[in-house]
Amino acid sequence: MARKRYYIACIPKEPLYNQIFEEQRYLQTAYGLKAMFNSPPHITLHRPFEWEEHKEDVLMQMLGSFKLNAPIDLKLNGYDGFPKRVFYIRVAPCDILNETYFMLRSHVRINLGLTNEFSNAYGFKPHITLAFRDLKPRQYDAIITEFANKVFAATFHVNELSLLKHHTVWTSIYTFGNPNTYSL
């Protein structure tokens, strides 16, 4: 059977989505970077995992039983990076996002047998990636220097999570978790 790759994330709505996309487009033009366009701007809550495609309905059904306790209001505040390999927009600390992350991690482990081992080892550091896979160390240094005095400030209202699936690029195929929808 065919296994496909999936991950779970918060995806900003317009106009913030486009504002982040424009930041990425600038990095493409100025530095020749393009790997970031394989996925929409997002905050990862569960790293990529493999799942049998023919059981995708089971995955969606189980994720559909997960609800956010409340909408999450996030603040984006500046730029940062994981040295020499990832450049991103910072997400301000948010207790509700952290609680959501741990509740979701538990939900998928118990109900779907999925682990988020990378996050277990390194902790949860929410961010929105602007450049990563094709980012070279010298480019990283130049970008960090260029953006050192630039400001990025925005708010981001999250009332649902997205399941993304990899085809040739990552695409949102299912949204879930909205605390304002109720199942009977």
Image (cartoon, rainbow, N blue to C red):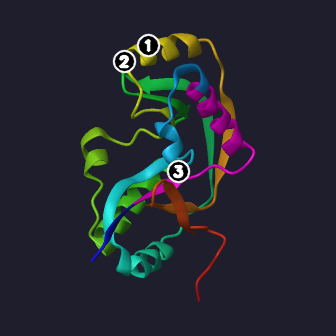
* 109 with respect to 25 (left or right): left
Residue 26 in the image, given as x and y percentages of width and height = 63, 26
For label 3, the SS is helix
For label 2, the SS is helix
For label 1, the SS is helix
The one of 119 and 1 positioned closer to us in this rendering = 1
Whether residue 154 appears in magenta in the rendering, the answer is no
Instruction: Inspect the image, locate mark 3, and give the three-letter code of the amino acid beneath it.
Output: Ile
Q: Earlier in the sequence, mark 2 or mark 3?
A: 3
Q: In which quarter of the image is the C terminus?
A: bottom right
Residue denoted by label 2 = 137
* 3 with respect to 101 (left or right): left
Q: Residue at position x 59%, y 62% from top?
A: 160
Instruction: Inspect the image, locate mark 2, and give the three-letter code of the amino acid beneath it.
Output: Pro
Q: Is residue 140 above or below residue 95?
A: above
Query: Alpha-carbon distance for marks 3 and 1?
Result: 33 Å
> Which class describes the residues within 10 Å of circle 1: few (<14), some (14-19), or many (20+)?
some
* 173 with respect to 21 (left or right): left
Residue 136 in the image, given as x and y percentages of width and height = 38, 22
> Which class describes the residues within 10 Å of circle 3: few (<14), some (14-19), or many (20+)?
some
Q: Can residue 166 be seen in this view?
A: yes
Q: Which of marks 3 and 1 is nearer the N terminus?
A: 3
Residue reaching furthest to the right: 15
